[in-house]
Amino acid sequence: GINAEYGVSRTVGARMRGLYILLLVSCFFFASAYKITRLASSEPVFQDVRALVVDHNNHGYLVSYGSSTLFEVNLNSLRVLRTATLPFPRARSLAIDASHGRLFIGFETNPGTVLRWDLGTWKASGNVTTFHSPRNLIFNADDSTLLVGTYPAVRSTGVIHKINGTTLQVLDTVELPTGFRARTMVYDTSRHYLYVGNDGAPASVARIWVEPTLARSDVITFPKNWDETSASVIDGQNSFAYFGLVSPVGRIAKIDLSTFTWVDTISTAGEGFSAAGIDNARGFAYFVSNEIPSALYRVRLCDFTLLDLEHLQQGDGFPSALHVRELSGIITVGTGCHNTLSCSGPSGIIKLQVTDVATCEKSTSSQPQHQYLTTVNFRFAGMIPSPSCCPPPEYFQSQPDIVETCSS
């Protein structure tokens, strides 16, 4: 009798677990009904695109590293409207001041150079020298300042410059933590913190106070063998930042900005990331891997779930820049070269689209809740789970009591 009762109990438990796994699988297939759709590709008229920004008219501005050329492209038709040969070599980074119709272009020179470009006259309107190559540029429209993160050519320590966007005067400079080179960064406009990702090992993110003057704060350091940050985005509410990490596999780390705490990770089976973008209106972030063929990963932000991916084509090249237009869900990817020294062929831009909106609805039973059940991430074959994504062993001796309803 005891054995029979135990057998029935095991059978019921197995059925419940099977039902839960079935629900997860169903959830994945339902979510996948809205795929990332490839719309078009431009003619390969660029050479090694390194940066892309977009204005209110959906005109994209791209810089080509090899030829140091600026392009204006109508992203609706992918037609090139204007070009200009820039006065400095190795154009690498971009920021846009859309309200004043100007660009800021960073060049990989030593010392570094930032050029201001007037979109109305299509001419340069001044430049400023930086300590090292200005690999990261963020324009702060609130006070018309430019935040510049530098990347020394040799393994040394970079700086953050704060520059007046109108006068091009360097207002302040602060050194990053020892050995830091600014690989990627995002700015929290509500708390006035700049978050700077390092390219060293192990990967780390430094928090820099921006207002009224620059000041170094604290650092999040990731585990050993998690090497280099590579791309990052911040959500529209300044609640979370998401940093892509390079090795040993591509990972996406979620950081709570209210406490400056690393709270979760998604791991992939691919390489690290070369570019990222965010669609706050639809609730997705996108990270594109630095490999051929590359993969564009879509992350649903409301529950930090890897939803799906779109493989780019073998001939697309290495993705190097990404922009998301929130009103239309259009994703524009600029492609370049993995190795600049051997980069001679042309490259192009790719246009994709997502039309659905991410929603996460959670219903609970009367049984005690186990929050780890909400982060089960079995939904994509080939993914390497993050440390937080999978149920602990005790889950397999319990019955599920939380049901996720995926609406995208």
Image (cartoon, helix red, strand yellow):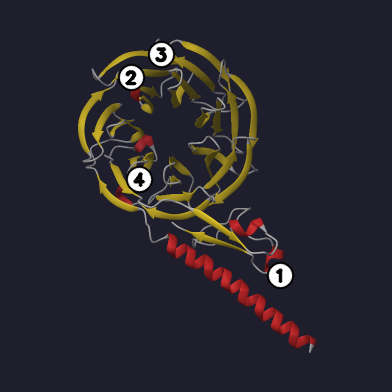
Q: CA distance from mark 1 to mark 2?
A: 62 Å
Q: CA distance from mark 2 to mark 4?
A: 25 Å
N-term-proximal mark, 1 vs 2: 2
Q: Residue 102: x, y in percent?
A: 32, 21
Mark 2 in CB contact with mark 4 (< 8 angstroms): no
Label 3 packing within 10 angstroms: few (<14), some (14-19), many (20+):
some
Residue at x-position 49% and y-position 38%: 235
Quadrant of the image for the C terminus?
Answer: bottom left
| Dot label at residue 121 | none
Quadrant of the image for the N terminus?
Answer: bottom right
Q: Is residue 256 above or below residue 212?
A: below
Q: CA distance from mark 1 to mark 4?
A: 43 Å
Residue tagged by mark 3?
A: 128
Residue tagged by mark 1?
A: 397
For numbered disc 1, what is the local secondary structure? Answer: helix
For numbered disc 2, what is the local secondary structure? Answer: helix
N-term-proximal mark, 1 vs 4: 4
Residue at x-position 26% and y-position 46%: 41
Looking at the picture, which amino acid does disc 4 mark? Answer: Gly
N-term-proximal mark, 1 vs 3: 3
In the image, 129: left or right of 397?
left
Residue tagged by mark 2?
A: 100
Q: Residue 347: x, y in percent?
A: 28, 40
Front: mark 1 or 3: 1
Given residues 213 and 275, the one toward you in this image is 213
Q: Residue furthest right?
A: 2
| Dot label at residue 329 | 4
Q: Residue furthest front?
A: 366
